Image (tube, rainbow, N blue to C red):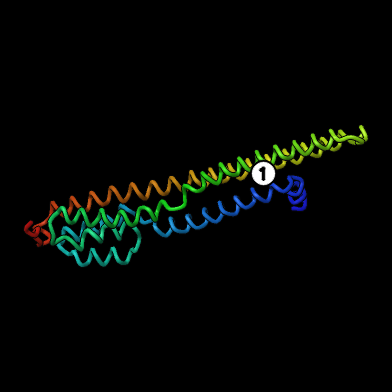
Amino acid sequence: MATLWEHYQEGGWAMWIILFWLILAIAIIAERSVYLYKSSINKDAFLSNIQKCILAGDIPKAVKMCSAANVPLARIVQAGLVKVNRPDEEVQAAMDEAALREIPRIAARTPYLALLSNISMLSALFGTVMGLIKSFNSVSGEGIDPSQKARLLAFGISEAMHCTAFGLAVAVFGLIGFAILNGQTQGLEDDINESSVRVLNLVVANRQKVNVQPAAG
């Protein structure tokens, strides 16, 4: 740990800027991971139970199941089920409206990870350039002992390289987090789209089984 701290200090003041981006990335990854985990549901088992309720004509039970699940997918399906006594277009519109509320929450903040990765890289580049400028200025001054020039130059280059390495590490961390969370987000969105269509088709195909008729337009 002491060695890591020493390497961090050798990177110069730009390391603190990169550390700030790292803290933001960690916070976003933690928050999004918890939210997506709580928003996940076994889609096939959930839809199987909903299908059984629809085929049995027990819409209130299906609505209660959606309320108990309390995840984005269930809330969207519930929005359609409570409208089964309305025309098919209104059932679909209700689910579409619920999806417009839920999907942005699922995808929120994840794209910032890609942005933070790019900013970390740019911050590392800036710190590297400043470190090199500092090292060359140190050896170009008058009155400097030639024997010290090599040491000053090596110190400045070392500062620049430490900054570059830290920036690259933060960028890689952020991009990996973005890829994982983006994949989970896309998976949830695909489940929502598929489930909405399946539930709507079940409602349309089983109007008489659920003992409701579309309201007159």
Residue 172 at x, y percent in the picture: 58, 42
Along the viewing direction, whichever of 53 and 94 lies nearer the viewer? 94
Q: Is residue 144 left or right of residue 113?
A: right
Along the viewing direction, whichever of 138 and 158 lies nearer the viewer? 138
Along the viewing direction, whichever of 53 and 90 lies nearer the viewer? 90
Residue lying at 58% horizontally and 44% vertically, measured from the top left: 119
Q: Is residue 149 left or right of residue 135?
A: right
Residue 171 at x, y percent in the picture: 58, 43
Q: Is residue 134 left or right of residue 186?
A: right
Residue lying at 52% horizontally and 45% vertically, measured from the top left: 115
Residue lying at 34% horizontally and 64% vertically, measured from the top left: 70
Choose top left, top right, bottom left or bottom right for residue 47: bottom left
Residue at the front extreme, as displayed: 142
Q: Which residue is mark 1?
A: 166
- The amino acid type found where label 1 is placed reads Phe
Residue lying at 48% horizontally and 43% vertically, measured from the top left: 179
Choose top left, top right, bottom left or bottom right for residue 60: bottom left
Give the quarter of the figure containing the C terminus. bottom left
